[in-house]
Image (cartoon, rainbow, N blue to C red):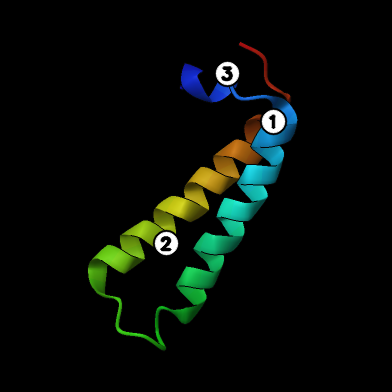
Amino acid sequence: MSFIYKVPSKTRLISGIAILAIGQLSLFYMGEFDTGGLGGFLAGFCTTLGFVLIVTRNKKE
């Protein structure tokens, strides 16, 4: 996970919020459009990655 710490803190926060929003919108529209298992996996992955980026925004290597 050390590669995440090389990204600047402000960039981690902004990209984390954007990725989290994309993941949540994907999960929201998953029932409307037939995305299948891969769509659910990618939406969950985006949500988790966005959350990790936001939580680690103040951490240093």
In the displayed structure, would residue 14 be above or below residue 12? Answer: below
Most distant residue in the left direction: 37
* Other-residue count near label 3 (Cα within 10 Å), few / some / many at <14 / 14–19 / ≥20: few
- Residue 15 pos. (x, y %): 63, 44
Q: CA distance from mark 3 to mark 2?
A: 25 Å
For label 2, the SS is helix
On-image quarter of the C terminus: top right
* Other-residue count near label 2 (Cα within 10 Å), few / some / many at <14 / 14–19 / ≥20: many
Marks 2 and 1, the one that precedes in the sequence: 2
Q: Is residue 21 left or right of residue 48?
A: right
Most distant residue in the top direction: 61
Q: Amino acid at mark 2?
A: Ala
Q: Residue at x 41, y 88 (%)?
A: 32
For label 1, the SS is helix
Q: Is residue 25 left or right of residue 31?
A: right
Q: Residue at x 34, y 66 (%)?
A: 40
Q: CA distance from mark 2 to mark 1?
A: 21 Å
Q: Which residue is mark 3?
A: 6
Q: Which mark is residue 22?
A: none
Is disc 3 in contact with disc 2, using a CB cutoff of under 8 Å? no
Of badges 3 and 1, nearer the viewer stands: 3
Q: Which residue is mark 2?
A: 43
- Residue 34 pos. (x, y %): 30, 84
Q: Which residue is mark 1?
A: 57
- Residue 19 pos. (x, y %): 56, 52
User: Could you say which quadrant of the image residue 33 lies in?
Assistant: bottom left
In the displayed structure, would residue 8 be above or below residue 20? Answer: above
For label 3, the SS is loop
